[in-house]
Structure formats: C-alpha cells, structure tokens
Amino acid sequence: MRAAKKTGTSALQFFPAKISMRSLYDAARRCEGCPLFQNATQTVFGTGLLSSAVVLVGEQPGHEEDLQGKPFVGPAGRVLEEALGEAGIDRAQAYLTNVVKHFKWVPRGKRRLHEKPSAREIAACLPWLEKEIELIRPKVLVCLGATAAQALLRKDFRVTLEHGRVMETALAAHAVATIHPSSILRQRTPEDRHRAENGFIADLKVVARLLKSPRR
C-alpha cells in the first residue's frame, strides 16, 4: 500500500470547470477526495451510452475492475450480464457505474478482499455519480445492493424487503432496487444460488417492462 497523505473531503474539489461526461471522466482520474485513491490502481468511472435509458449502479469496483479500469468486468459482472440477458435487457444499451469509484480492499495473503466503503467515503465520492445520472437522465435507475439504494433512494432502505418495487425519485422517471450480483456468488449452496438468481432476474424483468413502457 502507498503511504497515506493529506486528501480533500469531496469529489467536488476536483470537478472540471466545464461539465461533460468526458471532462468528468478525465477529472475523476485525478480525484483525491477521500483516501481510497491511495491504494487503488486507478479510478473506475462509469461506462455506457449517454443516451442510455437505464443506469445500473453498484457499490464499488472490485479486484478485476480496479485492474481493468471498467465497472462490472469481474465475476459479479458476468452474473449481471447473464441476468440482464434473461430479463431481456441489452447490457450494451445500459450505463454501468458505482457509487464509489476506487476499490477499497484489505490484504489476505496475496489476495485483495473487498471492504465496504464508509459513509464518509461514499459522501465524498457521490458527486461523481450524481452528475453522471444528471447528464444521462435515464428512464430507469437501478440500484444494485444496499449501498447504492441507501445512497440514492433512502438511508434506511432495505433491499431484502423492498427489492423489485418501482419507486419515485428525482434522479429518473423510475427507480428499482435489487440485490448486488456479487451476493449471488456468496450463496452457500447451488439451491440458494439458483433461488437468488431467480429473484434477481425477476427484479430485472420489472426494469425491462419499465423500459418498454411509454416514457413519462
């Protein structure tokens, strides 16, 4: 790990003077708004079409995302891609991003294990995500997991109880929360994994129906 040094307190300190997705992407590469940049390989910004009708938001990049610089390219990303296909959503037409743009991890031998970002780290990084969503203006905002749902919808949001529901938000015409695909990989038995996959796909089918409905 690199030695710690003084950092800022918010991504806003690193925003470009003129806002566009390209300028945000470039500026985010230099973000030091929280200490997470110190041990990450690189910033992992969102990817996808500016015209995307759906934005999918996870918690943070993982090991593979940190190395490749793109969101959802690791094992959880493969689970997501399969589930999107089952639900009838083209991943290539979606915008994929995370609440936190740097990989937070702890060492376990030669491995780097995911560690949940703190409330302060989430708050520092959130301006990047809010501006991404503002520029895209999606029809449907999909929160993958509790961190995204609590950051964007409601602090006391419980994915286990409220997943798959269509909700109102100022960020998009509709919002839907569901589990993070990584939670499927953590299931202990094939039966549990199959059950979790089916629930995940069912929630994404709600999103698919919203995408096919007339825009309001």
Image (spheres, rainbow, N blue to C red):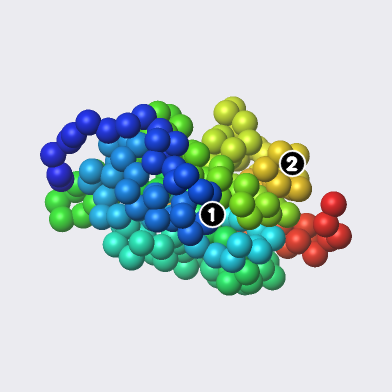
Label 1 residue SS: loop
Residue 107 falls left or right of residue 209? left
Query: Looking at the picture, how far across and down is residue 167, in whole percent?
Result: 74, 41
Does residue 130 appear left or right of residue 115 in this picture?
right
Residue lying farthest to the front in this orientation: 17
For residue 9, side relative to residue 3 (left or right): right
Which residue is tagged 2? 167
Q: Does residue 40 lie above or below 82 as drawn?
A: above
Q: Quadrant of the N terminus?
A: top left
Q: Which corner quadrant of the image does residue 65 belong to?
A: bottom left
Percent across and percent down for residue 93 are 62, 69
For mark 2, give the secondary structure. Answer: strand
Mark 1: amino acid: Ser
Point 52% across, 56% down: residue: 21
Q: Which residue is mark 1?
A: 20
Of the two numbered discs 2 and 1 on the same chain, state the one appearing first in sequence.
1
- Badge 2: few (under 14), some or many (20 or more) residues near its Cα, within 10 Å? some
| Viewer-side residue, 171 vs 155 | 171
Q: Residue at x 33, y 65 (%)?
A: 68
User: Taking the image as drawn, is residue 134 in sight?
Assistant: yes
Q: Amino acid at mark 2?
A: Met
Q: In the image, what residue occupies the spot 39% across and 41% down?
A: 14
